[in-house]
Every structure is written in C-alpha cells, then in structure tokens.
C-alpha cells in the first residue's frame, strides 16, 4: 500500500489535476490512498475570509467567497465535472462558508473552533474534486472524509492526533474501500475532536496527515508530492545552485523540517519513524524524477569517518530573550523556573545558550511575550532582541568531526553571531545571526560545502 500526498500546487490547476490523476493511476497496483491539500492559495483566502467576517466587512467577505466560487467552478467545468456531483458539493460548501461568516460577524471575533471549521473547506473541495475526476475518467475513487478518521484533541489550529482511536477508524473506513479496488481521497490537515468539532493540524499539516495514515495502516511507503525536486541542499530562492539530496535519514530530515526547510512539515516524519516507513519527496511536475528517499539509515559510503554536510536550513522572524540574574548565581532550579514560565504560556523555545548568570533563548511566537517578560521580571532582568534568524547545518558526524565549528565560523568572520548550539545533536550545528545577514551567510556556506566533488550516493550531481 502506498500513501500519496499532493500539495496545493499539485492540485492547483486543471492541468495539474490531470497530471496527478496520471501519477495515481501509475501506482494502481500498489493500492494507493491519496491525501490532498487545498488548491493553491485557497487556504490563504479562507484565512482572510475569517478575518473580514469578524471585522464585519461584508463586501470583502462576498468578494472572497465569489473568488473561491469562480476558481472552483472554472476548474470543475474544464475538468468536465459539471453535473457529475461536484457542482452540488461546491454549492453546499459555499452555503456553509456563508453561515460560518455570518456567525463570526455576529460575534465580532474569530472563534477558534469556527475558524478551524472554515479553514477545513479548502481541503474538502479539493479532495471531492479530485475524487470526482478520478472516478469518472480514470479509476474507481471516492472521497473519504478525514473528519471520520482522524481523532484529535481540542487544540484548535494545532491539534494533536489520538493515534489509537484514529488507527481504528482508518482501518474500519479506508481498508474496505481499498479492498473494493477504490482509491480513497482524504483531506490532509483536517480532523475532528471528541466533541465532533472540526480541528486542523496547523499550516502544512497535510504531510503529517499522510504519514499518520501510513503508520495507522502499516503502509509500505509514503510519497510526498509537491512542486520541488526533493529535499535540497539549501533554499533555492536564496541559492540557485542548490542540489537535490538523493537519500537522507529520518533524523536529518526532521532537523531540517524543524529548522525551516519548507519541503516538509516538522511533525511529518514522526509516524513514519514509528513504523519505519520509507518516505519519498517527489515533484509532481516531473513525476519521472527520483526525488529524495528518507529512511532510517544512511547509504554506506567509502569514507566513513569524515563529516558530510547534507543541507543548510534557516528559520527567520525570531526573537532572542536573554534572562540575567546575579541573585541566581549557582542556584539550582534557575533554568527550571525559566522554562516553567515559557511552558505556562505555551511558547516553544528553539535554541538555548547559558552562562553562570544568564540564559538566552530564541522563540518564534511572541504572542505571549509581554506576559512572559512580566513573570521573568520578578526574579531577573529581561532583554529582548528582534530580527534574528537561526542557521542550521545538518549532516553526518557533525558532532565528532574535529574543526567543524572553526571551519564554519572562519567563513563568517565578518558576521555577528549571537548564540551557538553544538552537541545537543550529532547531526547539526546551529547559530543565531541578524536576519538581514541570512542571504549572504547561506550563499557563503553553500559555496564552501557544495561546490566541490560531492558523493554521488548522496547528492544528484
């Protein structure tokens, strides 16, 4: 069994959907289950829709709803789906969106569970449209509602799946369809809490949905289809010469996803690791290419003792919070008291650097920063610096290769570096710089580590 996830650009046009249908048909013998994102940019439109509805701007609401209707109606007509059932789905969906907007208009604020419900309809439309096209023109297919499969907690917009309950649902609802020779098409990103309310997994969560379903059904492989050739050595918008990585480990890919590589959602690989399911990252625009294979082990290489940098990731829009307290010098519990406050306000910390009397941390969510500063101020001085970015080099044997930090920082001797993290992981070195220095830093490091003779077992050269 293969789980195939297609992103927004992969289903973003009539031509794209026809190409996706051909890709799915080519996997027919592998019993595919398909997971889809919303048509490209539709989720952004739905975010704006909720905002304008809560702000009581009906003209803007009507404009966005009309745009969503026209987009899907034109695709429906050009795919030959008029009077094939999708027209009724589109009409019902637009009516539902209008009802949600009317409620948000009355409340005057974005109610969390209504916001998730509204956002979920991008995937609802795309999954119905693709299933309808497949079933009428390519192969037997049916839309299988993710809300009947994926059970989550009630953390709206960042819901956490309940694996065992969801697995029971997946086996009950999806396996019979596969046995009947049908292709189930499931919304990514979407679930339902135990009270029956629609939840979402966070932006980019369709990747996570795919690997969750793969793990629940013990799939042989998960394929993540997008508009890039695979996992690359750097962001191609910064480095035109970025190269495709042919193979990497779960751990390496997870580090890259967490530190900003946009090709994968940070949580994507956890279910695949749990079941040791290989994950391919592939380009739906070039389905014949090999992409990137992510597995539990690295390929055997002749020179087993040297470090090999696989990729350079970055995370921008960060804030550095530095906590200083001479009263806490040598006192036990200092770090615990700091982290307890961040935990209380559900604010994740990326990197940490400590000295005898101070601790510096990076965060990307400043929503609760005022409250955090107030509580930290009870026992320390708090300084905040904005406009920072993390650069992360990921690869094999980074920790045990002598001289790696010196080599990196010699290349950047004219760059201000605020925090450095090495040793917490065997496979990465991370540091914090000014966000304005990002393009030059990434290009400089990439030119050094990826311009020579590269291992053809690891890189497409």
Image: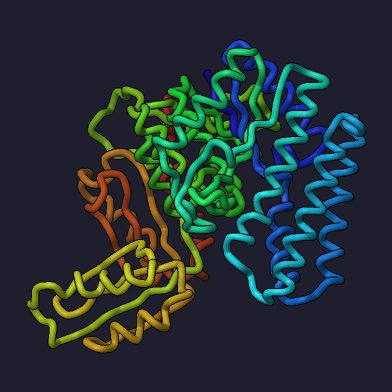
Picture quadrant of residue 328: bottom left
Picture quadrant of residue 48: bottom right
Q: Nearer the viewer, residue 420 or 371?
A: 371
Across the whole image, how many numbered discs are drawn on residues?
Answer: 0
Q: Position of residue 371 (x, y in %)?
A: 39, 82
Q: Position of residue 249 (x, y in %)?
A: 37, 33
Q: Is residue 83 left or right of residue 275?
A: right
Q: Is residue 437 left or right of residue 270?
A: right
Can you name the residue that lies furthest to the front here? 195
Q: Residue at x 45, y 31 (%)?
A: 167
Q: Position of residue 435 (x, y in %)?
A: 49, 69
Observer able to see residue 447 = no
Relative to 246, residue 343 above or below: below
Q: Position of residue 365 (x, y in %)?
A: 46, 69
Relative to 258, residue 269 above or below: above
Picture quadrant of residue 306: top left
Observer able to see residue 220 = yes
Q: Is residue 7 left or right of residue 380?
A: right
Q: Residue at x 73, y 17 (%)?
A: 140
Q: Nearer the viewer, residue 178 or 224?
A: 178
Q: How is the image coloured?
A: rainbow
Q: Nearer the viewer, residue 195 or 32?
A: 195
Relative to 229, residue 328 above or below: below
Relative to 348, residue 171 above or below: above
Q: Residue at x 51, y 29 (%)?
A: 170
Q: Is residue 286 left or right of residue 30?
A: right
Q: Residue at x 13, y 72 (%)?
A: 333
């Amino acid at each position: 069994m293969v789980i195939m996830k297609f992103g927004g650009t992969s289903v973003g046009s009539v031509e794209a959907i026809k190409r996706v249908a051909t890709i799915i048909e080519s996997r027919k013998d592998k019993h595919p289950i398909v997971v889809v994102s919303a048509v490209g940019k539709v989720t952004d439109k739905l975010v704006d829709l909720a905002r304008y509805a809560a702000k009581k701007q009906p003209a803007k609401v009507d404009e966005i709803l009309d745009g969503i209707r026209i987009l899907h109606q034109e695709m429906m007509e050009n795919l030959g789906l008029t009077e094939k059932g999708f027209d009724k789905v589109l009409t019902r969906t637009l009516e539902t969106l209008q009802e949600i907007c009317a409620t948000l208009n009355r409340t005057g604020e974005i109610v969390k569970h209504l916001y998730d419900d509204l956002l979920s309809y991008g995937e609802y439309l795309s999954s119905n449209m693709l299933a309808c096209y497949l079933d009428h023109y390519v192969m037997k297919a049916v839309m299988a509602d993710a809300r009947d499969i994926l059970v989550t907690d009630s953390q709206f917009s960042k819901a956490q799946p309940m694996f065992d309950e969801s697995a029971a649902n997946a086996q009950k609802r999806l396996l019979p369809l596969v046995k009947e020779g049908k292709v189930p098409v499931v919304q990514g990103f979407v679930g339902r809490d135990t009270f029956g309310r629609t939840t979402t997994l966070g932006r980019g969560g369709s990747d996570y949905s795919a690997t969750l379903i793969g793990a629940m059904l013990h799939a042989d492989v998960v394929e993540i289809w997008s508009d890039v050739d695979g996992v690359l050595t750097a962001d191609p918008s910064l480095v035109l010469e970025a190269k495709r990585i042919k193979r990497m480990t779960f751990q390496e890919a997870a580090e890259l996803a967490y530190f900003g590589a946009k090709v994968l959602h940070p949580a994507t690989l956890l279910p695949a690791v749990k079941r040791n399911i290989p994950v391919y990252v592939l380009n739906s625009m070039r389905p014949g290419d090999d992409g990137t294979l992510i597995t539990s082990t690295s390929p055997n290489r002749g020179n087993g003792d040297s470090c090999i940098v696989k990729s350079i990731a970055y995370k921008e829009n960060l804030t550095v919070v530095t906590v200083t307290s001479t009263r806490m010098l040598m006192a036990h519990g200092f770090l615990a008291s700091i982290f307890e406050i961040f935990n209380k306000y559900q604010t994740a910390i990326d990197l940490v650097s400590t000295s005898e009397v101070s601790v510096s941390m990076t965060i990307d969510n400043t929503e609760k920063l005022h409250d955090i500063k107030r509580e930290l101020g009870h026992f320390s001085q708090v300084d905040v610096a904005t406009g920072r970015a993390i650069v992360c080099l990921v690869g094999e044997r980074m920790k045990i290769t002598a001289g790696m930090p010196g080599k990196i920082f010699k290349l950047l001797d004219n760059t201000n570096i605020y925090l450095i993290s090495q040793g917490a992981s065997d496979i990465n070195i991370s540091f914090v710089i000014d966000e304005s220095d990002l393009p030059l830093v990434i290009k400089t490091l990439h030119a050094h580590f990826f311009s020579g003779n590269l291992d053809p077992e690891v890189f497409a050269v």
